[in-house]
Amino acid sequence: MENEPIPDDTDGLRDDDYIILPTTLCKDHPTEVAAIEAMAECFYQRYSACPAFYTGSLIEACQAAFRSTATEKPRPVLVYMHHGRSIFGNIFCENIFCWTKIIDYLLENYIVWPCDVTLGENRNRLTDILPDQVINSFDVNKYPKLIGIKRIAQAQQGDSLVFENQSELLLEGDVLVRNQVTSNRENVLDELTFFKKQCDENEQSLSYYLNMQTRLGNNAILHIVKYITLNDAVNAFTINILLLLREGETAVEICDPDNLFINTILSKLEAKQVVSLRLTANWYCTQQDLSRLNSFSGIRTLSLLNFPDIKLLHMYQDYFPHIKNLCLWYDNEVNFTLFHDLFRYLNPSIKRFEVHCPGYICPHSDSNQWDIEFFTNYRIEYFLFDLSHFPLSPTSDCTNQWPSCFLITIMDLIKYIPNIQYFQLITSIGSMRKLLDLNEWIRMTSYCSRLAKITLRVLGCVEADEEISQKIIEIRNTLCGPPQNTQFQVIFH
């Protein structure tokens, strides 16, 4: 019929039925400022209230939010994305977004930037600003959206940090993304508070790191990191230290890493930078735990605290086949029988072997006899025995009858690593006199023909008395000549 209305593609809905708010970036508005002002005016007409919208571009909003002055601290940006055909949009604005408590909270804690994506032209413009994974979809049923933006340190250029903005989807349709619950006034306010707290903590971390960087300088920070684990470095200098370490390709050690820590450092460091792994008794569990560490194929040093079962070493070496240094740490005295058994499990790649403990069990209390052919390890080239870790007296001390017992205990282990080239012993001044038996040092060099250097580090004394000095000179002169040809030095600390 001539007078019958012509149907359109809106299923009977006219523009004023489904466009809840006027489009803010359409061609009718000459500037973004005019578009946002028109959107705010529409809010006041429809809801008699409106959050304080930032009138400018999103880039300008971020610049204003993260500009720190004496009177204003950085704050996050909240992007409100509106779609005129969304059934949730009008409900959200009327019941939640224009609630007095939320308006007041946003005014004090956020910069709010609105955007209407009803028109395709505006959607395309928005994708140039926000990442696709945050916008996620232009499905009408997934609107409105709230997107939080905070500042992160993304790169290190010389002595300065380069910052970028990180976006996080907070609300999609009528669902809060983090907890997957239907939105209401209280939980939306809670979510805004939670994101603001994250932003504040991040800004405090950045500020702290920048202050430390200014006071110490990058070179000093990098020097400190060499002597602590990455876990401790992050605690001391905040997570932003990772950017400096990545730039310098600094090698690091990690300790008892959980999944969160691993995922954090993998996003900011090259996996190859993790060259050392330290595990405590609390961490030793299953093969599944080790699978967390698959990314760190470049690990060269493995340190184990209170290692519970030497048979597990097979599993560790399977995951880290390039280990060159094995370090064992103990809180209690050690029976050296353990190490004779351990040698059979060591991969050929291990060249350096360290033991750190407070004391030893005298070998004369153990009646077991070892088969030198079966337990000998021909691959270890460096052996460090450190008794400076809260030194204890041996459980069965026979030094009164046998003064060289302490030295013999060490010799009886070293003879099973005949290709050793460098031996280092760290002990206290109280044990020094027990280490000056020339015959035992000659015995060591007879077992280990490739031994080129011996170092004794004595803690708690800056110099030796005359008697000790004479014995040191005698040992040094004897060992440096043929057939031993071994350098012998004693360093007092």
Image (cartoon, rainbow, N blue to C red):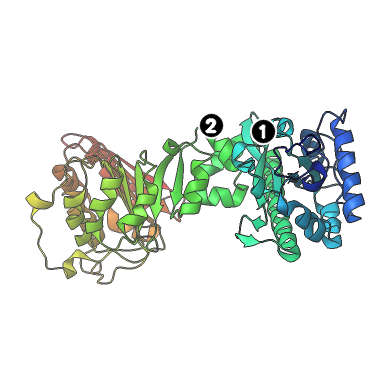
Q: Which of 160 and 440 is in front in this view?
A: 160
Please, what is the three-letter code of the amino acid marked with disc 2? Answer: Gly
Task: In this rendered view, identify the residue nearer to me: 32 or 383.
Answer: 32
Residue 248 has which mark? 2
Q: Residues within 10 Å of mark 1 (few under 14, many from 20)?
A: few
Residue indicated by mark 1:
127
Indicate left or right for 372 with 467 as reference.
Answer: left
Q: Find residue 300 and report its horizontal and vertical position in percent.
A: 35, 41
In depth, the one of 394 and 108 nearer the eye is 108
User: Are circles 2 and 1 on residues that touch, CB within 8 Å?
Assistant: no
* Residue drawn at 56 percent across, 41 percent down: 242
Q: How crowded is mark 2: few (under 14 residues within 10 Å), some or many (20 or more)?
A: few
On screen, 380 above or below 120? Answer: below
Q: In this view, does 483 lie above or below 372?
A: above
Q: Which of marks 2 and 1 is in front?
A: 1
Instruction: Say which mark, if any, is on residue 463.
Output: none
Q: Is mark 2 on a helix, strand or loop?
A: loop
Q: In this view, does 26 lie above or below 197?
A: above
Answer left or right for 114 relative to 147: right
How far across and down, in percent of the image, does residue 412 sit? 17, 55
**Residue drawn at (50%, 53%) of the image:** 260
- x, y percent for residue 56: 84, 35
The amino acid sitting under disc 1 is: Thr
Task: Estimate the spatial distance between the alpha carbons at disc 2 and disc 1, rounded to whole Å.
Answer: 34 Å
Q: Residue at x 22, y 62 (%)?
A: 405
